[in-house]
Image: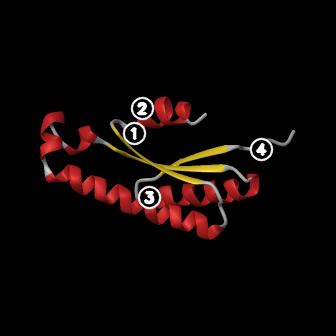
């Protein structure tokens, strides 16, 4: 039985492993003419001992800028590779929770 994917979600964080996963996701999206969703989750707890301090700190702006540039680069790479439907998404919170329990379910 052949499975055709309609939506492919890949989370990226700038690591070599994320880049490898992205390349696999791009190949699958092209093969299946699927919608590619590239996401990055800014882990608030990892960046600040207090959730309230995080929003007043420049680390928040730095993390946002990093995420925007990262996703813009990946979006351009996917389009250049021939993926026609590419969406990027930035979330805040625990990557483990956001990716598996929110993003994947919302995009299903």
Q: What residue is at 42 percent from the left and 31 percent from the top? A: 97
Residue 7: image quadrant is top right
Q: CA distance from mark 3 to mark 2?
A: 20 Å
13 relative position to 62: left or right? right
Label 1 crowd (10 A; few <14 / some 14-19 / many >=20): some
The residue tagged 4 is 4
Q: State yes or no: discs 2 and 1 in contact (Cβ < 8 Å).
A: yes
- In the image, residue 7 sits, relative to residue 104, either above or below, namely below
Q: What residue is at 14 percent from the left and 35 percent from the top? A: 52
Identify which residue, 2 or 70, lies in the foreground: 70
Q: Which mark is nearer the camera, 3 or 2? A: 3
Q: Secondary structure at mark 4?
A: loop
Label for residue 97?
2
- In the image, residue 51 sits, relative to residue 87, either above or below, namely above
Q: State yes or no: discs 1 and 4 in contact (Cβ < 8 Å).
A: no
Label 2 crowd (10 A; few <14 / some 14-19 / many >=20): few
Q: Percent x, y for residue 78?
A: 58, 63
Q: State which quarter of the image contains the C terminus.
A: top right
Q: State which quarter of the image contains the N terminus.
A: top right
Q: State yes or no: discs 3 and 1 in contact (Cβ < 8 Å).
A: no
1 relative position to 14: left or right? right
Q: Percent x, y for residue 28?
A: 69, 54
If you read the primary sequence from the N terminus, does the residue marked by circle 1 or circle 4 appear first? 4
The residue tagged 1 is 95
């Amino acid at each position: 039985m052949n499975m055709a994917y309609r939506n492919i979600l890949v989370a990226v964080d700038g690591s070599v492993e994320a880049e490898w996963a992205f390349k696999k996701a791009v190949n699958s999206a092209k093969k299946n003419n699927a919608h590619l969703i590239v996401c990055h989750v800014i882990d608030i707890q990892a960046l600040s001992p207090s959730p309230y301090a995080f929003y007043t700190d420049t680390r928040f702006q730095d993390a946002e800028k990093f995420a925007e540039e990262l996703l813009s680069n990946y979006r351009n790479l996917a389009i250049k590779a021939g993926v026609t439907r590419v969406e990027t998404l930035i979330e805040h919170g625990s990557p483990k929770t956001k990716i598996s329990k929110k993003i994947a379910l919302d995009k299903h």
